[in-house]
Each structure stands twice: as structure tokens, then as C-alpha cells.
């Protein structure tokens, strides 16, 4: 079975895109966007994650469906962890602690 080969040019372009997104993340941290700062940072991080998964982990060229299923399971599990973390963070301060 012949495997798909990725050219050096593709890797270099993806690396440049990752560096631009990293610079964008650093630059946006100096701008006060209020509540949207976290949302924009997470969107940029998701774009970087997608680039790494598609090109460096070769998911873009994967033919087996089981690999895509496991990638989906990983994203689903990460989503569960993020929802639970955000639920904890948002609900802090609801209960009054005596002495504080």
C-alpha cells in the first residue's frame, strides 16, 4: 500500500502558519477585549491544534476510519473536561464561606 508523502514545502507553510498564529496570540494578549479575550485565544489555539493534527500527525491523509473515530473520542473527552472546568470556575463564589 502506497503512503501519501508530504513535501517539505507543506511542512514549512504549516510551520509559518503556526508561527503567525502564535504571534497573533501574543499580540492579542496586549489588547483588552474584555470577556472575548478567552474566546479568541481558544479559537486561535483550536486552529493551531487543527493544523498540528492534520499535517504533523497526518490525519489529513489517513484513510482508516478508526483513526478518525479515536480523534473524535479525544476531542469529545477534552470537551467534557473543559465543560467541567468552566462549570467549576463560573460557580465560584456562589456559596458564602464564613470568615472570608
Image (tube, helix red, strand yellow):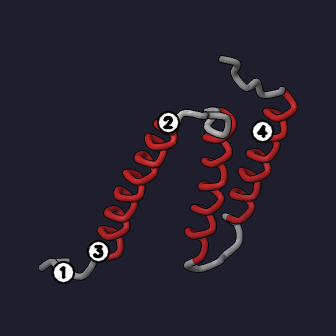
Residue on which disc 4 sits? 15
Q: Is residue 38 above or below residue 21?
A: below
In the rendered structure, the answer to whether residue 100 lies left or right of residue 38 reads left
Q: Secondary structure at mark 2?
A: helix
Figure quadrant of residue 83: bottom left
Residue on which disc 2 sits? 67
| Label 3 or label 4, whichever comes before in sequence order | 4
Q: CA distance from mark 2 to mark 4?
A: 24 Å
Question: Residue 49, percent across and down?
Answer: 60, 47
Q: Of the residues tagged 3 and 4, which is closer to the observer?
A: 4
Question: Residue 86, percent across and down?
Answer: 37, 67
Q: Secondary structure at mark 4?
A: helix
Q: CA distance from mark 3 to mark 2?
A: 38 Å
Q: Are marks 1 and 2 in contact (CB under 8 Å)?
A: no
- Residue 3, numbered label: none
Q: Is residue 20 above or below residue 54?
A: below
Residue on which disc 1 sits? 95
Q: Are marks 4 and 1 in contact (CB under 8 Å)?
A: no
Q: Is residue 5 above or below residue 50?
A: above
Badge 1 density bin: few <14, some 14–19, many ≥20, Cα 10 Å: few
Q: Are marks 3 and 4 in contact (CB under 8 Å)?
A: no
Question: Which residue is painted at 77% across and 45% down in the image?
Answer: 19
Q: CA distance from mark 3 to mark 4?
A: 39 Å
Amino acid at each position: 500500500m502506497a503512503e501519501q508523502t508530504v513535501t517539505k514545502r507543506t511542512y514549512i507553510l504549516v510551520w509559518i502558519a503556526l508561527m503567525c498564529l502564535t504571534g497573533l496570540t501574543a499580540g492579542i494578549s496586549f489588547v483588552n477585549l474584555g470577556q472575548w479575550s478567552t474566546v479568541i485565544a481558544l479559537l486561535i489555539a483550536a486552529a493551531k491544534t487543527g493544523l498540528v493534527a492534520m499535517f504533523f500527525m497526518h490525519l489529513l491523509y489517513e484513510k482508516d476510519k478508526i483513526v478518525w473515530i479515536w480523534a473524535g473520542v479525544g476531542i469529545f473527552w477534552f470537551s467534557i473536561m473543559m465543560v467541567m472546568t468552566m462549570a467549576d470556575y463560573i460557580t465560584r463564589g456562589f456559596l458564602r464561606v464564613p470568615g472570608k
